[in-house]
Image: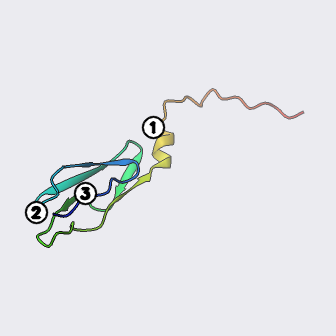
Amino acid sequence: NCGKPSRPVNGIVFGTSTKYPNKIRYECDKGYDLIGPKVRSCQAKGIWSDREPICKGKILSLIYNSSVEVSRLSVPKCT
């Protein structure tokens, strides 16, 4: 038994079996990129393959994919 894998902040783990030779899969919430393995396997020696992935924010893609319209933004004049 490899034990319950940690859920990455801003992400989710798919798969419930923690016994050899099962696998789990990671995904990140919208606006985040997965850094590290997408899939990990429970190994015969009772540890998960690879290291735990993290979810890192995509600041630029949040700006570009935003539904906020900024083209009509007005800036007051300084007097």
Query: Which residue was labeled with disc 3?
Result: 4
Indicate the quadrant containing the C terminus: top left, top right, bottom left or bottom right. top right
Give the x, y percent position of residue 52. Answer: 31, 63
Give the x, y percent position of residue 5. Answer: 27, 58
Residue type indicated by callout 2: Tyr
Picture quarter containing residue 35?
bottom left
In percent of the image, x 27 and y 52: which residue is there? 26
Task: Farthest residue to the bottom: give it.
Answer: 45
Picture quarter containing residue 19?
bottom left
Q: Which mark is residue 65?
A: 1
Q: For the residue carrying disc 3, how many other residues have a C-alpha within 10 Å: few (<14), some (14-19), or many (20+)?
A: few
Q: Are marks 3 and 2 in contact (CB under 8 Å)?
A: no
Q: Is residue 21 left or right of residue 73?
A: left
Picture quarter containing residue 53?
bottom left
Q: Earlier in the sequence, mark 1 or mark 2?
A: 2
Q: Nearer the viewer, mark 1 or mark 2?
A: 2
User: At numbered mark 2, what does the secondary structure look like: helix, strand or loop?
Assistant: loop
Q: Earlier in the sequence, mark 3 or mark 1?
A: 3
12 vs 63, nearest the viewer: 12
User: At numbered mark 3, what does the secondary structure look like: helix, strand or loop?
Assistant: loop
Give the x, y percent position of residue 37. Answer: 27, 61
Q: Which mark is residue 20?
A: 2
Q: For the residue carrying disc 1, how many other residues have a C-alpha within 10 Å: few (<14), some (14-19), or many (20+)?
A: few
C-alpha separation, residue under disc 3 versus residue under disc 1: 35 Å
In percent of the image, x 33 and y 53: which residue is there? 7
